[in-house]
Image (cartoon, rainbow, N blue to C red):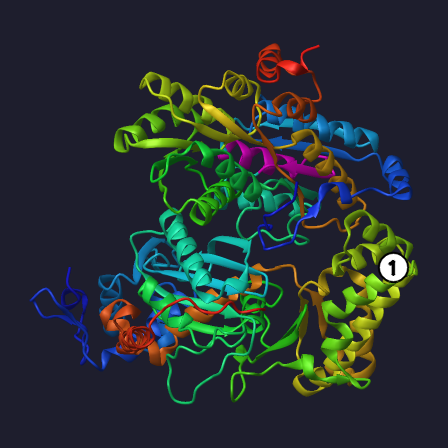
């Protein structure tokens, strides 16, 4: 049945079939298609009646646009809903398998890959250690190999619609250009290699890059403790310390894309990273082990030859005085850096992630104490401060969610909705063309190893 | 023996021998007399028997009663039904090896939703998180097992040849990790080899799958099976085809140990330590029940087994004297070692 047949009183700017097999969408119909798709996709409206009510569009327009969305393969009819005084309404739902999203996360010693559906839900994830000293080529090769394996294992016949990449450094946000391949400057000697372009060309889809802490923030916001919250701060406490801000439901990236560099904040004359970063904690823990100030850590060092942040956490849980003091001190420093942010932003949730946050309740309690002590009572009245339970998955989930948000952002969506796939969006094509040019200009050869 | 793989959420492994119950905690646990149910994919394999033995012994040591052991017969529906039932039974904790990922995730969530502790073996269904959904995943280093499988097969794979992977067609983290690691090791150390794959939907189809793989790729000159039971089925398929193809696999089950001893097809085995894993799972269960926070990813290293060390490896893994055929093969290989 064609869209024309479904309408009862034709809309002025109907989505229509030209009869030549090619599906055309009138320019004026794209706004309403975009609005209706996003209502269905987010679950805000799943029946024709709800769509009419939420969109304030007429019945004929909704019927026409739904038929177009079904024809485009973006929406499908589902089960019958509950009848309320008449015929039971037929639910419509977004086809989350119409395309696939790939997600990757790079860190200084590990990488992770995942494959997600169009709701951003991960279907699978894999994490492994990585040796970055060999330079960027083996890493892009590895990501590509793992992507291919995952698509073979979990993918459908659907295309890859986009790739989300999390990198362990701030990612420059250009002004004006919407789809942009930034240089990965996190690793030495990588800036001369077109990593993002290479990854995009191998998958045939554009790449959206964000800093690791920003994707972790998105992951926590969409799938972790932040579900249902509009204003939150995520803090990654690891080798580096960074923060991510969700304000009124939107990730705040800042003017240059570098929002959240709280590791540089000075606390008692030293940077927060120098006070509470994992390297500092490990160094102090090792010294305590060697000098036997901590009998627990001395035992760990004798047994394993190393002392990690995790060991300090175990020691604190088992009542080792040094470990308790070490983590409490780190927690206080984090709390003191966070309190001004809490006062400024009035979040309802602060989530702590990263290896230092996973050490246990001692650090968490110290953070809470410092934030509560230095904040206005109204700021902390309903403020929750929690530890992340998503681990390394937060960054992957968030990378996929960054892509979902970008693909279905109304203005971008208008650019491809009539073409059924964002791969056909002129900006996607332009992105890939520029990537191909960059690769042509840059003869790929052996690079000097990049120490990390 | 080191642990090379990361956990389901990228966690660094904490070796099982570093996770212990303090004397004070042990005393508290004994007074609380916990009840624990164990849900396994099977209870009949050598691996499952040893895993169970380690858990039961350890839980007993802390006065926790194992009130039920469920054998799901590799059936995800059985597991879903068992978990939904156990959520309403008077047990304090459930130890489970999830059969699959998405299909069993909700049923596993029913356990913490009912206020009980959940400890997972080998596998965390996608989306399940430590702390919120489960206490710990206690696992073999499956990534390491895959690497060992590749390392042991490599000397027997001819240069430029084709190597087959007999993979499990179910969404199972542990076997996926083995396959990914096998491919990675071969890619890094034997880029001359071509890798091809056959996927069996359940172990009863492993022989047919292997035969199909050989039909499609008669040039196969080496095979890695993701665990020992399908490896035995694959060996039967190889013999039916009248061929001799070197193989490696995971788990030193009795049948595959005999195959290793005869030296014909199986050239090496990446062995797990199921009894030790069972002990670690028991410890994690007690810690979780006491409100301690054991590490989210507790792992045990794999053990590379060849004819050179199969007798001692057998003793370590199964805590029993090796069967006569293994000892005989050892005597033949090391004549001076015979008393």
Q: Residue furthest front?
A: B336
Q: Which residues are magenta?
A: B76-97
Query: Could you tell me if residue A80 is visible in this image?
Result: yes
When asked about the image quadrant of residue B252, the answer is: top right
Q: Position of residue A7 (x, y in %)?
A: 18, 69
Disc 1 on helix, strand or loop? helix
Residue drawn at point x = 65 percent, y = 84 percent = A345
Residue drawn at point x = 38 percent, y = 68 percent = A445
Residue under numbered circle 1: A290
Q: Position of residue B44 (x, y in %)?
A: 58, 21
Mark 1 neighbour density, 10 Å: few (under 14) some (14–19) many (20 or more):
some
> Is B97 positioned to the left or the right of B216 in the image?
right
When asked about the image quadrant of residue A353, the answer is: bottom right
Look at the image and say whether residue B79 sits in the magenta stretch. Answer: yes
User: Mark 1, chain letter?
Assistant: A
Query: Could you tell me if residue A59 is visible in this image?
Result: no
Q: Residue A232, relative to residue B52: is it above or below?
A: below
In this rendered view, identify the residue nearer to me: A418 or A218.
A218
Q: Position of residue A247 (x, y in %)?
A: 57, 81
Which quarter of the rendering shows the C terminus of chain A? bottom right
């Amino acid at each position: 049945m064609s869209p024309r047949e479904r309408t009862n009183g034709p809309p002025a700017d109907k989505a229509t079939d030209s009869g030549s097999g090619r599906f055309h969408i009138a320019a004026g119909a794209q706004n309403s298609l975009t609005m209706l798709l996003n209502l269905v996709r987010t679950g805000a409206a799943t029946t024709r009646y709800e769509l009419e009510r939420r969109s304030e569009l007429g019945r004929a327009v909704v019927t026409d646009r739904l038929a177009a969305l079904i024809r485009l393969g973006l929406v499908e009819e589902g089960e019958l809903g509950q009848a309320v005084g008449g015929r039971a309404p037929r639910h419509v739902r977004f086809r989350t398998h119409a395309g696939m999203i790939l997600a990757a996360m790079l860190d200084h010693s590990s990488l992770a890959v995942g494959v997600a559906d169009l709701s951003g839900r991960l279907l699978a994830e894999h994490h492994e250690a990585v040796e970055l000293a060999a330079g960027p080529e083996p890493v892009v090769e590895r990501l590509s190999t793992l992507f291919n394996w995952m698509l073979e294992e979990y993918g459908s016949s659907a295309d890859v619609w986009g790739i989300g990449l999390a990198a362990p450094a701030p990612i420059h946000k250009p002004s004006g250009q919407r789809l942009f391949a930034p240089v990965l400057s996190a690793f030495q000697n990588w800036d001369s290699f077109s990593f993002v372009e290479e990854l995009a060309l191998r998958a045939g889809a554009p790449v959206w890059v964000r800093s690791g802490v920003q994707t972790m923030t998105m992951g926590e916001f969409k799938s972790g403790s932040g579900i249902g919250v509009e204003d939150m701060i995520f803090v990654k406490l690891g080798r580096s310390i960074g923060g991510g801000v969700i304000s009124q439901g939107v990730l705040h990236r800042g003017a240059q894309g570098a929002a959240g560099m709280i590791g540089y904040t000075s606390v008692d004359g030293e940077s927060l990273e120098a006070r509470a970063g994992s390297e500092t904690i490990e160094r102090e823990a090792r010294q305590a082990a060697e000098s036997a100030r901590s009998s627990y850590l001395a035992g760990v060092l004798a047994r394993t030859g190393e002392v990690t942040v995790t060991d300090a956490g175990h020691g604190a849980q088992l009542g080792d005085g040094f470990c308790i003091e070490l983590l409490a001190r780190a927690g206080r420093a984090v709390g003191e850096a966070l309190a001004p942010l809490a006062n400024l932003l009035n979040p309802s949730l602060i989530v702590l992630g990263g290896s230092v946050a996973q050490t246990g309740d001692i650090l968490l309690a110290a953070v809470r104490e410092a934030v509560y002590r230095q904040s206005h009572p109204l700021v902390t009245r309903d403020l929750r401060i929690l530890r992340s339970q998503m681990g390394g998955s937060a960054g992957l989930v968030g990378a996929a969610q960054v892509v979902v948000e970008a693909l279905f952002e109304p203005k971008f969506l208008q650019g491809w909705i009539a073409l059924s796939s964002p791969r056909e969006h002129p900006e996607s094509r332009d992105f890939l063309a520029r990537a191909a040019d960059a690769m042509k200009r840059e003869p790929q050869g052996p690079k000097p190893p990049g120490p990390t | 023996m080191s642990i090379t793989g990361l956990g389901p959420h990228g966690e660094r492994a904490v070796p099982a021998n570093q996770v212990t119950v303090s004397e004070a905690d042990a005393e508290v646990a004994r007074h609380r007399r916990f009840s624990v149910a164990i849900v396994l994919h099977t209870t009949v394999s050598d691996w499952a028997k040893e895993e169970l033995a380690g858990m039961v012994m350890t839980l007993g040591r802390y006065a926790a009663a194992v009130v039920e052991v469920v054998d799901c017969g590799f059936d995800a529906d059985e597991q879903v039904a068992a978990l939904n039932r156990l959520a309403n039974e008077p047990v304090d904790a459930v130890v489970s090896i999830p059969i699959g990922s998405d299909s069993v995730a909700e049923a596993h969530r029913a356990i913490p939703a009912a206020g009980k502790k959940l400890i997972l073996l080998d596998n965390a269904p996608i989306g399940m998180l430590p702390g919120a959904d489960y206490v710990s995943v206690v696992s073999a280093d499956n990534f390491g097992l895959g690497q060992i499988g590749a390392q042991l097969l490599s000397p027997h794979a001819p240069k430029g040849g084709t190597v087959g992977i007999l993979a499990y067609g179910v969404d199972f983290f542990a076997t996926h990790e083995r396959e990914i690691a096998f491919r990675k090791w071969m890619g890094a150390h034997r880029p001359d080899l071509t890798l091809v794959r056959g996927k069996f939907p359940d172990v009863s189809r492993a022989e047919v799958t292997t035969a199909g793989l050989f039909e499609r790729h008669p040039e196969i000159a080496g095979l890695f099976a993701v665990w020992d039971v399908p490896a035995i089925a694959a060996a039967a398929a190889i013999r039916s085809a009248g061929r001799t193809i070197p193989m490696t696999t995971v788990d030193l089950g009795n049948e595959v140990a005999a195959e290793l001893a005869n030296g014909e097809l199986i050239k090496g085995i990446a062995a797990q330590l199921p009894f030790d894993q069972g002990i670690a799972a028991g410890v994690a269960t007690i810690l979780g029940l006491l409100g301690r926070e054991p590490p989210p990813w507790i792992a045990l290293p794999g053990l590379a087994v060849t004819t050179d060390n199969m007798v001692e490896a057998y003793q370590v893994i199964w805590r029993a004297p090796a069967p006569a055929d293994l000892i005989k093969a050892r005597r033949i290989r090391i004549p001076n070692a015979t008393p």
